[in-house]
Image (cartoon, rainbow, N blue to C red):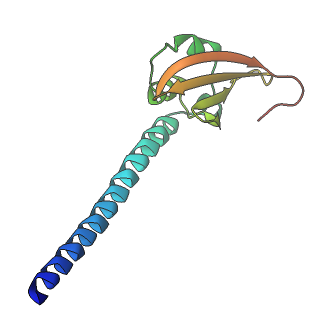
Amino acid sequence: MLLSNVSYGGMLMNKKRLFVYLIIYLVFFLFLVVTSYDNKVLEIEEKNQYTWQKYMNEDEYNQLQKDMSYIDVVRIVGGAGKEIKSDVYEWNDEILLTRGYQIQFENDRLVKKEIKERRGNSMR
């Protein structure tokens, strides 16, 4: 009887240890995914000769198509947008201080894009 309790306790300890290892691997995997995504954006932005090139212009806006991924949009624009809501990003216009471009994503796919006219002070 005592031997079976020790064996059962050992199984519980192994399950706990397995669970801890799985959590550690999951956290490590998520860290790799997030850092590789940030590295792609940084790599794209570093190719710009000037800082203003990370903003959007009307020609770039017109190139955006439905079902594009966020990273595809970043490649076209040359920089990351500012997340203003969950899955909604905004880029400033390269020239006009009174215009911004809002792009909405669902499941990392472009579903809606619109030009926002701003009044008053610039958001830069």
Count of marks overlaid on the render: 0
Q: Nearer the viewer, residue 30 or 20?
A: 20
Quadrant in which the C terminus is drawn? top right
Q: Is residue 22 left or right of residue 101?
A: left
List x then y, in percent, for residue 90. Answer: 65, 29
Q: Is residue 86 left or right of residue 3?
A: right
Q: Nearer the viewer, residue 23 or 40?
A: 23
Q: Nearer the viewer, residue 97 or 104?
A: 104
Quadrant in which the N terminus is drawn? bottom left
Q: Quadrant of residue 14?
A: bottom left
Q: Quadrant of residue 62?
A: top right
The residue lying at 45 percent from left, 40 percent from top is 43
In the picture as drawn, the residue positioned furthest to the right comes out as 120
In the picture as drawn, the residue positioned furthest to the bottom comes out as 2
Q: Is residue 7 left or right of residue 103?
A: left
List x then y, in percent, for residue 84. Answer: 67, 35
List x then y, in percent, for residue 40. Answer: 42, 39
The residue lying at 51 percent from left, 21 percent from top is 110
The residue lying at 34 percent from left, 58 percent from top is 28
Q: Quadrant of residue 56?
A: top right
In the picture as drawn, the residue positioned furthest to the front comes out as 1
List x then y, in percent, for residue 3. Answer: 9, 86
Q: Nearer the viewer, residue 90 or 97?
A: 90
